[in-house]
Image (cartoon, grey):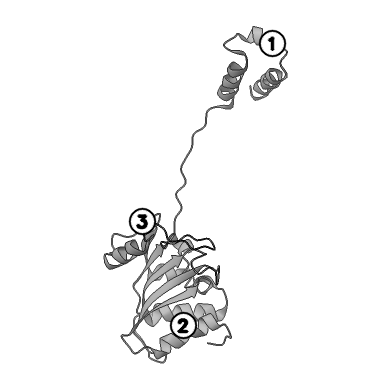
Amino acid sequence: LSTTKSELLFVERIYHLLKKGGSACLIVPQGVLFGSGKAFKTLRQTLVERCDLKAVITMPSGVFKLYAGVSTAILLFTKVWGPKEKFTQPATEQVWFYEMTADGYSLDDKRSKQADYGDLQDIVAKFHARDSDTENDRTRKYFSVPRTDIEAEGYDLSLSRYKEDVFEEIEYEAPGVILDRLLKAEVGDVSDKDLAKVQNGIVRELLELRDMIG
């Protein structure tokens, strides 16, 4: 790689040191997953095409406090093709993503032990039980993404690129209904004729608003 960025050179070095069939599990800054520079993309393309990139597990910022607050991720891959080998088929078929939100310790500077292990045990269990045919619901905290989708996104490996957010639809009452309720709370159950006689400033403003919206 033509770069001086140590996080990229570190991953590249591990790839070169691995024998074919050897696996590695690395922790990298999340910037490695989505950096737009040529070296970033080249490295990610190598991980997808020349390795079987099994998993990308994002970790929350604060996991490495007090030393660093940067967000990090775990990469798990197996070397399939050497750097100069010609290949007929990219090594990766599916990449499994998991969004870790807790590691069993508080995410502040104290890093106090919590009552459980956070997501750690769930990650291990879900990884070994992963099924790319059924884990295609991208609204969950873990899901699988086909290599073709990753290629189409320029080898971006950030979980947020593929995760789908769920927005809950909220229905609100009509403004007139809300204003009537506020008026009733102020003066009780009275007729509009009696309301017009009320000198309360709040009531007058509510009546003006109701007239404006029809």
**Label ID, residue 137:** 3
Question: Mark 3 against mark 2, which lies toward the viewer?
Answer: 2
Which label's residue is closer to the chain start, 3 or 1?
Answer: 3
Q: Position of residue 5 (x, y in %)?
A: 57, 82
Callout 2, which amino acid? Val
Q: Tag 3: residue type? A: Asp
Mark closer to the chain start, 1 or 2 = 2
Q: Quadrant of the C terminus?
A: top right
Residue 35 location, x and y as percent?
55, 73
Question: Which comes before the other along the chain, label 3 or label 2?
Answer: 2
The residue at which mark 2 appears reads as 11
Q: Secondary structure at mark 1?
A: loop
For marks 3 and 1, give the CA distance: 56 Å
Q: Residue at x 49, y 63 (%)?
A: 111
Residue 196 numbered tag: 1
- Answer whether labels 3 and 2 touch (C-beta < 8 Å): no
Closer mark to the observer between disc 3 and disc 1 = 1
Q: Label 1 is placed on what type of residue?
A: Ala
Check disc 2: other Cα within 10 Å, few if <14, some if 14-19, many if 20+: many
For residue 164, side relative to residue 210 (left or right)? left
The residue tagged with tag 2: helix, strand or loop?
A: helix
Q: Is residue 132 visible?
A: no
Name the residue rendered at 73%, 19% in the picture: 201
Disc 3 secondary structure class = loop
Marks 1/2: CA–CA distance: 75 Å
CA separation in Å, label 3 and label 2: 30 Å
